[in-house]
Amino acid sequence: MNNYIYEYYQKIRSGEIVVGKWISMLYEKIITGMESGDYRFDQKKAGKAVRFVETFCHHCEGRDDLIKLELWQKAITSLIFGIVEEDGSRVFREVVVVMARKQGKTLFASAIIAYMAYMDGEYGAKVYCLAPKLEQANIVYDNFYQMLQKEPEMGGRAKKRRSDIYIAESNTSIKPIAFNAKKSDGFNPQLVVCDEIASWQGDAGLKQYEVMKSALGARRQPLVLSISTAGYINDGIYDELMKRCTPVLKGGSRERRLLPILYTIDDPDKWDDINELRKSNPNLGVSVPVDFLLEEIAVAENSLSKRAEFLTKYCNIKQSSSVAWLEYQTVDAACTREYSLEDFRSSYCVGGIDLSQTTDLTACCVVIEKAGKLYTFSRFFMPSARLETATAEDGVPYGIFVKQGILTLSGEHYVDYHDCFNWFKELVEEYEILPLKIGYDRYSAQYLIEEMKTYGFHMDDVHQGENLTPVIREFEGILKDGVFEMGGNNLLKSHFLNVALKHNSETRKFRPVKIDKRSRIDGFVSVIDAMTVRQKWYAQIGDQLKNEG
C-alpha cells in the first residue's frame, strides 16, 4: 500500500515536482512529525479514502468518468484522513486549501463530502455547504448531487428533498446554507465546506465562520474544509486564516488541528514564468493546459488591471483591487513587525491628520525614523453612534479595532477633535515623542488646529490633489524597499490597500482616490500628510528626524 504523503514529499525533495515554500514547509513538517512520533499515520485509513474517491466519485462537468486523483490530491486526502490520534480519530479539524482557479477545488470538496457522508461512520451527520449567498453555496452542493446521480451505489441511497439531500440509513443530511450568524442554534456539523472564503466580506464572514466552528464540539472528529483562490477582500476570514496558517507552517504556532494547504507562487516578479506558476497550479497540464495560461499571460502583459487579476486567479497572490495602486504583498510586508511607543521614547517625528468631513473616520499618525527605517503609529476616531452602521456598511470589524486600541470612539454623532489633540499631547507628555511638523488638510481643520498651535505644535497645511504626486512617488519607493513599517495595525493596512491613483494624462500627475465608494483611505491620507511635511522640511529638520543622538 502506497504512502502518498511520503511519495509526494520525495518528489518535491528531488525536484521532480515543483511547489512553493508553503507546501514545501507543510510536507517537511508532516514528515518530520511522522518520523518523531508527533504525528501518527494510519495508512489503511488514508488508502481507504483515496480508493473510495477513485471508485465511486465521478467528474461532473465536461466528462463523467471516475475521478483519477493526481499525486498531490492523494497526498492531501491522506493528510486529512490518515493523520490520526491514538484513538484513531482524525487530528486535523480545520483544513484550508488555497490554490489557483481551475485546479478542481469544487470537485475535490464534493468528493470529500461523499466520503464523509457515506464512509465516516457518523450516524446523524450534518453536512453544510456554506457561502455568503445561497447561489454560491449551491455550487459545491449541486456538484455533489451530480456526483451522486452518476454513481448508483451512492445515488440509490440518497433522496433529494426541497432543501437538502438525505441518506436515511445513516440519518445524514447535506444542505447548502447562506450566512445567518444570528440563527446559530441547531447547527451540529460533521462537515462544513466553506466555499471561496476570499470573497467573504469582513465581519459577517468572520462571525459565520466562528458560529460553525464553535458548533463542532459535539462531534468526535468534525471537519471544516475551506477552499478558495486568493481575492481582494481585506480583514475578512481569509486574512484571519492566513494569519493562523503561516505561523503553523513556520513553526511559530502551537495549533495542532489546523492543516494549511497553500499553493501559491513565491516570487510575484516571476508571475509570467510557467515554471513558477506550477507552484500555484498543481494541476497544470491536467485540468489547466499550459497554452491557456500562456494566452492569459499575453493579455495581462498589456493591462495593469488584467495583470492584477492574473496574479489573483492564477498566481494565488492576493490583490487589494484590480485597479489598486499597491500590490497586496507590498503592503503586507510592512505589517510583519510588532513594536510599541515605548520603543521610541524620546524621539523626534512628523505627524499627519486627516479629519472627517461629517461622520467618517478621522485618522491621526506620526512617522518616526530609526536606524534608517520609518515606523508609523496611527490612531483612528469614530463617533460612537456610527459604530454599528459603519461596520455593516463598510464590511469592516470596527468593534475589533476598538478593543485593540486602534480605533477610539469619540463623540456621539461627530468626532470630538479634542480627542485627536489629546492623542498627540499624550505622545509628548507620556513618551517624549515630539512631532516637529504636523501636516493637515486646511479645509476640514476647524478648531483643532488652533488648539494644536496653542499647545506648541508646528502645523503645516497640505494641499490635497495632484500636487501630492512627488510625495506618493517617493513613498512608493520607500514601501517597495521595505523600510516602512506599520506594525499590526490592520485597519491602516486596509486603508493602504483601498487606494487607487487617478491619472491626469495632460499633466502626467495623479491623485489618490478610493478604489470604490465603500472603501476608506483616511489612514493612508494622514500618513501622506506626514510624509509631505517630512519631504518639505527635511533640509531643516532631517538631522533631528534621524534620531541618531
Image (spheres, grey):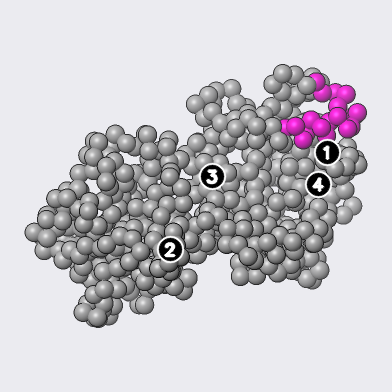
The magenta stretch spans residue 250: no
Q: Which of pointers 3 and 4 lies earlier in the amino acid sequence?
A: 4
Q: Amino acid at mark 1?
A: Cys
Instruction: Give the SS element for disc 2.
Output: strand
Residue positioned 50% across, 36% down in the render: 204
Residue at image mark 3: 237
Instruction: Give the SS element for disc 3.
Output: helix
Residue at image mark 1: 60
Q: Which of pointers 2 and 1 lies earlier in the amino acid sequence?
A: 1
Residue 46 — which label? 4
Q: Which one is in front in this view, the residue at disc 2 or the one at disc 1?
A: 2
**Image quadrant where residue 154 sits:** top right
In the picture, the quarter occupied by the C terminus is: bottom left
All told, the count of numbered labels is 4
Residue positioned 49% across, 62% down in the render: 326
Residue placed most toward the observer, 31 or 26: 26
Q: Marks 2 and 3, Cα distance to the nearest angstrom?
A: 37 Å
Residue at image mark 2: 504
Disc 1: CA contacts within 10 A as few (<14), some (14-19) or many (>=20): many
Q: Which one is in front in this view, the residue at disc 2 or the one at disc 4?
A: 2
Q: Which of pointers 1 and 3 lies earlier in the amino acid sequence?
A: 1
Q: Marks 2 and 4, Cα distance to the nearest angstrom?
A: 59 Å
Residue farthest left in this picture: 454
Could you tell me residue 155's position as x and y percent? 86, 27
Q: Which of pointers 1 and 4 lies earlier in the amino acid sequence?
A: 4
Q: Marks 1 and 3, Cα distance to the nearest angstrom?
A: 29 Å
Q: Marks 2 and 1, Cα distance to the nearest angstrom?
A: 49 Å
**As displayed, is residue 214 above or below residue 23?**
above
Magenta segment: 141-159
Q: Amino acid at mark 4?
A: Ala
Residue positioned 56% across, 48% down in the render: 238
